[in-house]
Amino acid sequence: MLEAAHPVPDAAGAEATERLLALVDGAGADDHVLVLVSGGGSALLGAPAGLALADLQEVVSDLLRSGADVAAMNVVRRRLGAAAGGRLAARAAPAPVTALVISDVVGDDPADVASGPTVPDPTSDADALAVLDRYGVDAPGARARLTAGALAPAPAAGAATWSRVRTIVVASARRSLDAAAQRLRRAGLPTALLAPDLTGEARDAGGFLAAVALGCLDGAGPLQPPCAFVSGGETTVTVRGDGRGGRNSEAALGLALALPDGAPIWALCADSDGIDGTGPHAGALVGPDLWRRVDRAWARAALDRNDSASVFERADALFVPGPTGTNVNDVRLLLVGRPAMERGRSG
């Protein structure tokens, strides 16, 4: 077991990656390399290729703050990681390789899980530079490496080397969402899968979920209350302030601020790995009594400075399950009840 940092790679992760690569370098035709891949591997397999670790840390940190989604970030990380973009599998030649992947990305493309250590890279150095331009990331060290094109890529998709490599997605976000929906239905709640691949700014995603819930209360939604919705995907946060939070607590706050006081709506927005970005919370809970616990105007100002964790901490509504041992993207649960007067009439 080799420890490393996340989401920004560190020296321990770089050393651990080099040890793993040295191990697969020694594999022969009579060996079989088994690779277990899950979300977070882009950081944990953090050895840089053709640039200093500090330069890799800079570009990753800047991308994390820029609002770039994971697919865009991985275009860059695949070009700059010593194990990424199929390089781990390529270095295991001539041994056969089997990779079992737990997907935490929208669409379940293995190239985007841990930056694809066992699949060919479908992008180029020019694509990576275009991502940096799109999100306004300077990162001079990374740009110099990408401009020079000094690192030979792993074999192309059609190369013979891939005939000895099998990459299989064994668990995914969609399966976790289906399981959550089944559990809610067994509890007697009509449940719909809503936006399983939701992306975009976290606070806007929260506003979208609030609109769906309010539509149900007004009789214009896809289900009639009481009912439930399950949503997945992975949102992003463009960091403009210096607060504490994460994409799930920010989505929860965006949702809460779009609801009127006392609305019979409950929600959980959480990262399935138990850590919302840098944690230590996984996300946050929203309920009808939230605005009795914290001031709405203060919470709105907190959102402006990306300080969603402080809001839910004050309301005692942070969701802190601890590390779950897996990572299949984000899970958002939305419960819509009946107004209090209606509940009283119906018993």
Image: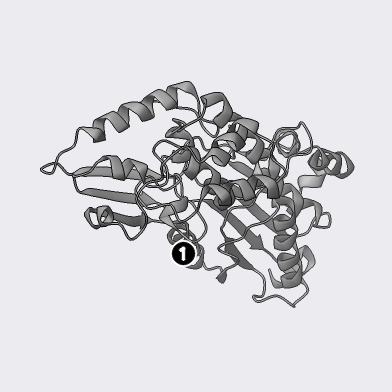
Q: Which of 10 and 310 is in front in this view?
A: 10
Colour mapping: one colour
Residue 266 location (% of width, % of height): 67, 55
Count of labels shown? 1
Instruction: Give the residue at the far left of this rendering.
Output: 30
At x 57% / y 70%, what residue is drawn? 192
Q: Answer yes or no: is residue 1 visible.
A: no
* Amino acid type shown at disc 1: Asp
Direction from residue 99 to residue 283 in the image, left or right: right
Residue 335 occupies which quadrant of the picture? Answer: bottom right
Where's residue 117, x and y in %? 38, 45
Q: Residue at x 36, y 52 (%)?
A: 119
Q: Observer-nearest residue: 69 or 86?
A: 86
154 or 295, which lies in front? 154
Left or right: 178, with 315 as reference point: left
The front one of 80 and 42 is 80
Quadrant containing the N terminus in the rendered view: top left
Q: In this view, does 236 lie to the left or right of 19?
A: right
Q: Is mark 1 on a helix, strand or loop?
A: helix
Quadrant in the picture for the C terminus: bottom right
Residue under the point 24% across and 57% down? 163
Find residue 156 and report its horizontal and vertical position in percent.
37, 55
Binning the other alpha carbons within 10 Å of mark 1 as few (below 14), some (14 to 19) or many (20 upward) gives some
Residue 28 figure quarter: top left
Residue situated furthest right in the rendering:
297
Query: Can see residue 187?
Result: yes
What residue is disc 1 on?
A: 178
